[in-house]
Amino acid sequence: MEQGTVRIAAINQQPIEISGESNAGLLVAACLAAAAQGDIAAYYDLGVAYSTGSHGVQCDLIEAHKWFNLAAVAGHEESAWCRADIADEMTAREIAEAQRRAREWLAAGSRKAA
């Protein structure tokens, strides 16, 4: 990979690589598309982006917890550690909101599959 190029998730098993600061928002958009297809790595990558405020998104621990939670439930081990780490910085209400958003994501996915 070139310097400045970031691999974030994959769509149809093909890695997504986007370079340049001006394309930072595209990284999250591509990752959201991959997450909609159930890509566990995309869940994790979104958690990283939201927990660090990188790739064109503001730091949002509720969204980060949601994505780490989805990845952890799907078996991504590192996500469970990341979720626990940011939970230490969150209130009980924020964690409850993150869990509610994760349930909504899962429910929306199951409605699409039906």
Image (spheres, rainbow, N blue to C red):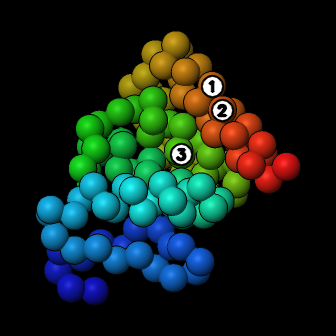
The amino acid pointed to by label 1 is Arg
Question: Foreground mark, 1 or 2?
Answer: 2
For residue 68, the mark is 3
Question: Foreground mark, 3 or 2?
Answer: 2
Estimate the spatial distance between the alpha carbons at disc 3 and disc 2, rounded to whole Å. Answer: 15 Å
Label 3–label 1 contact, CB within 8 A:
no
Give how far across and how far down residue 54 sits, in percent.
25, 50
Q: Residue at x 74, y 49 (%)?
A: 112
Q: Residue at x 48, y 54 (%)?
A: 32
Label 3–label 2 contact, CB within 8 A:
no
Give how far across and how far down residue 26 sits, in percent.
31, 61
Quarter of the rendering occupied by the N terminus: bottom left
Residue 108 occupies quadrant: top right
Residue 25 occupies quadrant: bottom left
Question: Foreground mark, 3 or 1?
Answer: 1
Mark 3 burial class by Cα count in 10 Å: few <14, some 14-19, many 20+: many
- The answer to whether residue 21 is visible is yes
Give how far across and how far down residue 63 sits, in percent.
45, 35
Kindly identify which residue carries mark 1.
Answer: 100
Label 1–label 2 contact, CB within 8 A:
yes
For residue 75, the mark is none
Q: Residue at x 68, y 33 (%)?
A: 103
Earlier-in-chain disc, 3 versus 1? 3
Q: Secondary structure at mark 1?
A: helix
The amino acid pointed to by label 3 is Phe
Residue 6 lies, with reference to residue 105, above or below; the image says: below
Mark 2 burial class by Cα count in 10 Å: few <14, some 14-19, many 20+: few
